[in-house]
Amino acid sequence: MASTASVVPASYAHLDDLSILKRIEKGELDAYEGIMRHHNQRLYRIARSIVTDDAEAMDVVQETFIAAFERLNELREPAALPAWLARITRNSALMRLRKSQRLKFMDEPDFDNVLNLSSARRPEQPDAKLANKQLSRLLEKFIDELPDAFRTVFMMRAIEQCSVATTAELLDIAPNTVKTRYHRARLLLQKQMMDYSDSVGVAVHEFAGHRCDAIVCNVLATLHASRR
């Protein structure tokens, strides 16, 4: 990625996309900053979900905005801008995977393989241990809140890794009852986790502040330089 420009441009983010596009059409290149600020977060998350790396995702977003600016004449309707930018982002991210030979079929995952992925596949982040401890405490709290019958089966199956047959034998219940209670326990835990994330406003892969400024400055600097 190009070095970040030292000056953050005056904001056009208060303008809507249509107003910004009209200014760009009249030659006001810096107005493109507003488009970037409107769509940075969403495009970053799209890119990040494909390349699974923060720095690469930022590169993809930067490439997207540069490519999109050069092809603005292809945009038929301003209302189509979000979807158009998303497609460019997706294609750019997939191209990166192809170049690095990391592209796999983006269909339904092989869940057996997904579940067996080693944690060594990606280096652990510095704050991963703290995050894992916090998540463990939260999960323990939610397990404690499960109905007694569900909680015991969940502990035997998920935590102790007992088989259905062993769990049924230890708890003196039918194997089908084990399966049903385990399934319902997992659904309850999933709901508790989702309710918790909704209540506290959990955000994933936030893209704001200096990272947003970096994309804006780098793209504008590149566009200005290409016109000298």
Image (cartoon, grey):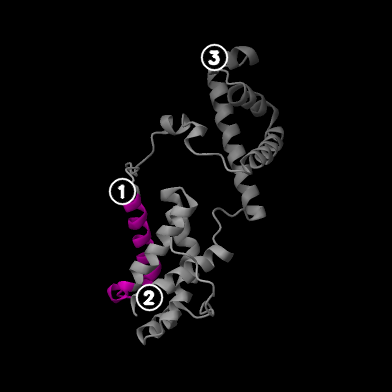
Horizontally, residue 86 falls left or right of residue 189, namely left
How many numbered discs? 3
Q: Nearer the viewer, mark 2 or mark 3?
A: 2
Judge the density around disc 1: few (<14), some (14-19), many (≥20) Cα neighbours within 10 Å.
Answer: few
x 43%, y 76%: residue: 32
Residue kind at label 1, given as amino acid type: Lys
- What secondary structure is found at the residue carrying circle 3? helix
Q: Nearer the viewer, residue 100 or 132?
A: 100
Answer above or below: position of 60 versus 142: below
Q: Name the dominant secondary structure of the magenta segment.
A: helix
Q: Is residue 91 left or right of residue 176?
A: left
Give the labeled residue for mark 3. 165
Q: CA distance from mark 1 to mark 3?
A: 48 Å
Q: Mark 1 or mark 2, which has the lower sequence index?
A: 1
Q: Judge left or right: residue 2 versus residue 126.
A: left
Dot 2 crowding, Cα within 10 Å, few <14, some 14–19, many 20+: few
The answer to whether 124 is drawn above or below residue 166 in the figure is below
Residue 225 marker: 2
Name the kind of residue labelled 3 in the image: Ala
How far across and how far down the image is residue 16, in percent?
47, 79
Which of the two discs, 1 and 3, labels the residue nearer the N terminus? 1
Real-space Cα distance between discs 2 and 3?
A: 69 Å
Q: Which residues are magenta?
A: 70-96
Q: Position of residue 51 (x, y in %)?
A: 42, 49
